[in-house]
Image (cartoon, helix red, strand yellow):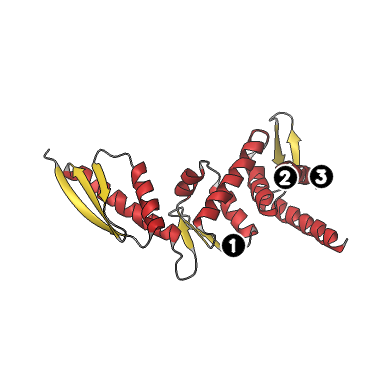
Amino acid sequence: MGHAKKVITIHVQNDREKEEFLREVGRLNLPAFIYVHGKLGSLKVNVQGTKGEIRDAVSKIMAIHSRVRARLYPNRRGLYRYSPDDLFREAGVSVPPASLVRTLELLGETVEFDEETGEIRTSLPWAEAVELVRKLGDVLSEISLRTTRQIREIILPVSVARGIDPDEVLETLVELGLAEWKEDKFKYELVKNKGQAMEELLAYLSREEGEEDED
């Protein structure tokens, strides 16, 4: 089991890409020893360990670099590509990816969710996407104990995208007869299916906003 060494060169376009890349590499917990040095433009990544450890580390380092590039630079269609896990780790909170996607839609952002890879492609830049996840996390922690998963998938996007207090969204759902309190479960749950409940809630909120505009 001889120790070997491999040096790979990573080309970066600017300080931000360099910082994001170094931070992600710093989070790796691998048996291989990894050391990065170099000037802006090209970083030399020095990997030491057994051949297997080096191979594993290099593939993870290359994957990190492509994920960092995907989230910093939009593709031809103007979309950034995020791994939800990266977003959640950066935000320090985890939320259902479906709620994140729905929030982006309600905000009028372009968004696509790749079922196979779990990747989210959206027009919202990285720092703003991280901030959005934090807001969703705050709402989730406020309501998670007294709501079912289905109802949370309505409250989270609507509360964050429309800037309405989550309790207010919940009260509105109950008033509209779309949700009710279940004594046996100590939770609020939907009375109608999720799609229909969301549609009726949004229609109601749009009417409310329309009336306020007229005043």
Structural distance between the alpha carbons of marks 2 and 3 = 15 Å
Does 93 appear above or below 14? above
Which residue shows up at 11% across the image and 40% down it? 2
Tell me the quadrant of the picture where the C terminus can be found: bottom right
Name of the residue lying farthest toward the left: 2
Question: Quadrant of the rendered structure where residue 75 is?
Answer: bottom left
Specify few, some or many for label 3: CA neighbours under 10 Å numbering under 14, 14-19, or 20 or more. Answer: few
Name of the residue lying farthest toward the bottom: 76
Q: Is residue 137 left or right of residue 119?
A: right
Q: Is residue 36 left or right of residue 125?
A: left
Q: How many discs mark residues in the rendered view?
A: 3
Give the residue at mark 3. 175
> x, y (%) of residue 108?
63, 62
Name the secondary structure under disc 2: loop
Q: Nearer the viewer, mark 2 or mark 3?
A: 2
Name of the residue lying farthest toward the front: 39
Give the residue at mark 2. 165
Q: Amino acid at mark 2?
A: Asp
Does 195 appear above or below 52? below
Give the residue at mark 1. 109
Q: Amino acid at mark 1?
A: Glu
Structural distance between the alpha carbons of marks 3 and 1 = 30 Å
Does 75 appear above or below 179? below
Tell me the quadrant of the picture where the N terminus can be found: top left
> x, y (%) of residue 109?
59, 62
Which residue shows up at 61% across the image and 46% down it? 135
Name the secondary structure under disc 1: loop
